[in-house]
């Protein structure tokens, strides 16, 4: 490795070395607050679903049943949306780093 190549790669290595720990600390703090809020919403959804399951639905009218079904569908969509995170595999991270090295 020549000195010219070293001086071309050194800023990138320093950038990675100084920014990665800062991003990981910020990400951990954000996920903790998100997970507690998500857990609270999820517990509310679970309690409402068990309440609907224990309900006597034989005395309900057709419009009330439709309203319950619509409410359950919206709660299901909300619960599915709670787990919408982006995951990167190790291979994808390596490819991204290699592309950044080639571009820079």
Image (cartoon, rainbow, N blue to C red):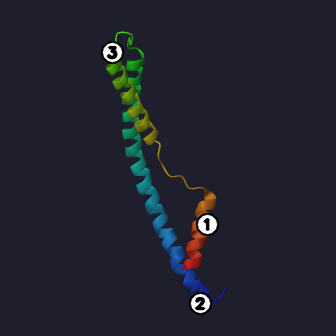
Q: What is the x, y in percent for residue 28? A: 44, 51
| Above or below, 3 relative to 68 | below
The residue at 37%/34% (across/down) is 41
Within 10 Å of disc 3 (Cα), the crowding (few <14, some 14-19, many 20+) is few
Q: Depth-wise, is mark 1 or mark 3 nearer the camera? A: 3
Q: Is residue 102 left or right of residue 15?
A: right
Q: CA distance from mark 3 to mark 2?
A: 80 Å
| Above or below, 104 relative to 45 | below
The residue at 38%/13% (across/down) is 57
**Residue indicated by mark 1:** 95
| Above or below, 48 relative to 6 | above
Foreground: 80 or 68? 68
Sequence-wise first label, 3 or 2: 2
Q: Is residue 2 left or right of residue 70?
A: right
The residue at 39%/25% (across/down) is 69
Q: What is the x, y in percent for residue 12? A: 52, 76
Q: What is the x, y in percent for residue 6? A: 59, 84
Sequence-wise first label, 1 or 3: 3
Q: Would you say residue 63 is visible in this rendering?
A: yes
Q: CA distance from mark 2 to mark 1?
A: 24 Å
**Residue indicated by mark 2:** 4
Q: What is the x, y in percent for residue 1? A: 67, 85
Under circle 3, the secondary element is loop
Q: Is residue 33 left or right of residue 92?
A: left
Within 10 Å of disc 2 (Cα), the crowding (few <14, some 14-19, many 20+) is few
**Residue indicated by mark 3:** 61
């Amino acid at each position: 490795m020549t000195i010219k190549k070293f001086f071309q790669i050194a800023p990138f290595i320093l950038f990675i070395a100084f920014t990665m720990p800062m991003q990981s600390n910020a990400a951990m703090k954000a996920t903790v607050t998100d997970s507690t809020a998500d857990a609270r919403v999820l517990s509310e959804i679970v309690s409402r679903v068990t309440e609907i399951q224990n309900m006597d639905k034989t005395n309900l009218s057709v419009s009330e049943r439709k309203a319950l079904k619509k409410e359950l569908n919206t709660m299901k969509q909300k619960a599915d949306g709670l787990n919408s995170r982006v995951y990167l595999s190790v291979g994808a991270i390596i490819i991204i780093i290699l592309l950044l090295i080639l571009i820079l």
